[in-house]
Amino acid sequence: MSLLATGDDTDGAWSLIENEADPGQGPAPHWHEEMIEGIYILEGEIDFETDDEGRRAGPDEFVLVLPRRVHTFTVVSNEPARYLILASPGGFEGYFEELQELRAEGDEWPPSDMAPVIEVMERYDTYLPPVE
């Protein structure tokens, strides 16, 4: 992960993060109350799912996720995918930093006790969808 612009750099308006994910990786389904998230693919292919609508995106393609929409993605290319995350408002980089700290503290990931992870998620406007 590379922080290209933080919330501190932009007076809290937005953050720009470059990230890489291995084949088969991606976040659990989640949603944001206020945050708008844009993802621009640099390398690889990623399958996105937003509110049960699917879309595959590759290099030079952009996916926009509006607030209150459940979304997730999975890297489907055989090589890692590199992408930019534009998050507004800014400060979302703290989410990734805190998750890295949690990962370093334990032997297993995800941990058997997800409470600390959920606390970090909610601190950064990231919520798991309700269980049906």
Image (cartoon, grey):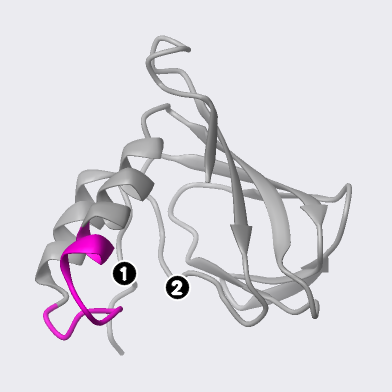
Check disc 1 and give the amino acid type.
Leu
What crowding class fits label 1: few (fewer than 14 Cα within 10 Å), some (14-19), or many (20 or more)? some
Depth check, front residue: 54 or 9? 9
Q: Residue furthest bottom?
A: 132
- Relative to 88, 97 lies left or right: left
- Relative to 84, 30 lies left or right: left
Q: Which residue is mark 2?
A: 29
The x, y position of residue 84, in whole percent, is 66, 43
The correct choice, above or below, for 56 with respect to 40 in the image is below
Secondary structure of residue under mark 1: loop
- Relative to 100, 123 lies left or right: left
* Image marks 2 and 1: residues in contact by CB distance under 8 Å: yes
Q: Is residue 103 magenta?
A: yes
The correct choice, above or below, for 62 with respect to 131 in the image is above
What label does residue 128 carry, if any? 1
The residue stretch that appears in magenta: 102-113
Depth check, front residue: 24 or 28? 24
Depth check, front residue: 118 or 100? 100
- How far is the residue under mark 2 from the one under mark 1? 6 Å
What crowding class fits label 2: few (fewer than 14 Cα within 10 Å), some (14-19), or many (20 or more)? some
Check disc 2 and give the amino acid type.
Pro
Look at 71% across and 68% down and name the residue there: 80
The correct choice, above or below, for 38 with respect to 51 in the image is above
